[in-house]
Image (cartoon, rainbow, N blue to C red):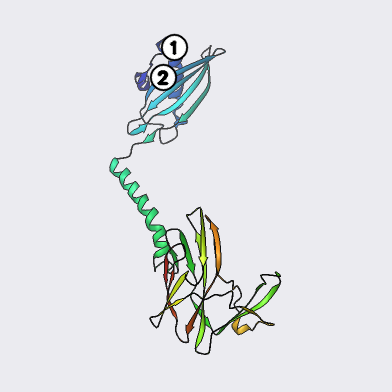
Amino acid sequence: MNELKNLNYGNFNNSKEIIDISLDFIISNKYEYGPDFENKEKKYEVTEIQTNDDISRIFFRFRIKGFSNPGEEYIEIDSENNILTRRVTKFPKLNKPKFLIGLTFISVLFAMISIPWLFLNSDEMDPLYKSGKVLWIKSDEPKYNSKINYDGPDALSGKLTNWEIDSNDNSTYLGYIKLQIINETANTITLNIDSNAAEFLASNGKTYSLSNSVSRAYEISKIQNNYKVNDFIPLWGDITLVEGTEVIGYLLVDLPKDVTVNRLRWIASDTVTINY
């Protein structure tokens, strides 16, 4: 058979008989290679023979044209030349032209860079989901009202309490924005959320600072539905995030009436800009 002519006995010429019997069994059972390799011409090489208790294990390496790495298999044969076991342990790998390898690498690299960038920074995807060097920030659209009512625990007693935040005077109202802030890459990062943590560029062309949503809150007896914000949690103070964790809450800004927020620029521990 053609495969027998393509056999390299290596250093095992003294075991030709059992090698030939083993290879003949392999050739007679090509289906073990599966449809991808069954009918392809192969060159065989004996790489090792192990013998124990009258059983020999013969290791073959086979090569197929067009495949960069060889396949490997072994046969177990007893002292009476009976085949006991045949195992294909490794299949060849296909050669890839260098330009295709390079193209694949460039495509993967481009995908690694462009997909997160598009997802986080493209207005066509989600214009309110942006990334900095460390932080990812997901924002809701800004909302506005003269007051905010919400319930939350009292810092001292832990008792669930009704709270209200009021605008400064009749000429202003409150802008509030829900943020999800994610520490994506840093081992640990501390956010110092104070009046300098963010800037708001408003529709009147002026820039406003973050308002203290904790000190401005005062207890009330009953929440009014027209001011109620169901999931309001003030974002204020020092917050430490380990890698992969997040914090969700609301930023507060005092604005002249009829003025809206056009842009949020987050500057605490990272820089992230979100346009509305």
Badge 2: few (under 14), some or many (20 or more) residues near its Cα, within 10 Å?
many
Q: Residue furthest top?
A: 14
Does dot 1 land on a helix, a strand or a loop?
helix
Residue at image point 38% right, 55% down: 113
Left or right, residue 50 beside residue 99: right
Can residue 245 be seen in this snapshot?
no
How many numbered discs, if any? 2
Asked whether the residues under the numbered discs 2 and 1 touch, taking CB atoms below 8 Å apart as contact, a structural biologist would say: yes
Can residue 58 be seen in this snapshot?
yes
Residue at the spot of label 1:
15
Q: Is residue 130 above or below residue 37?
A: below
Q: Position of residue 9 (x, y in %)?
A: 38, 16
Label disc, if present, on residue 197 of the rendered structure:
none
| Quadrant location of the N terminus in the rendered image | top left
Residue at the spot of label 2:
46
Q: Nearer the viewer, residue 76 or 104?
A: 104
Q: Is residue 270 above or below residue 232?
A: above
Q: Position of residue 108 (x, y in %)?
A: 37, 50
Q: Is residue 242 above or below residue 59?
A: below
Real-space CA distance between mark 2 and mark 1, rounded to the nearest whole angstrom: 10 Å
Could you tell me the amino acid type at mark 2? Val
Q: Position of residue 205 (x, y in %)?
A: 38, 81
Badge 1: few (under 14), some or many (20 or more) residues near its Cα, within 10 Å?
few
Q: Residue furthest bottom?
A: 170
Residue at image point 45% right, 81% down: 260
| Quadrant location of the C terminus in the rendered image | bottom left
Left or right, residue 66 beside residue 126: left
Could you tell me the amino acid type at mark 1? Ser
Q: Nearer the viewer, residue 251 or 9?
A: 251
- Which of pointers 2 and 1 lies earlier in the amino acid sequence? 1
Does dot 2 land on a helix, a strand or a loop?
strand
Q: Position of residue 2 (x, y in %)?
A: 35, 22
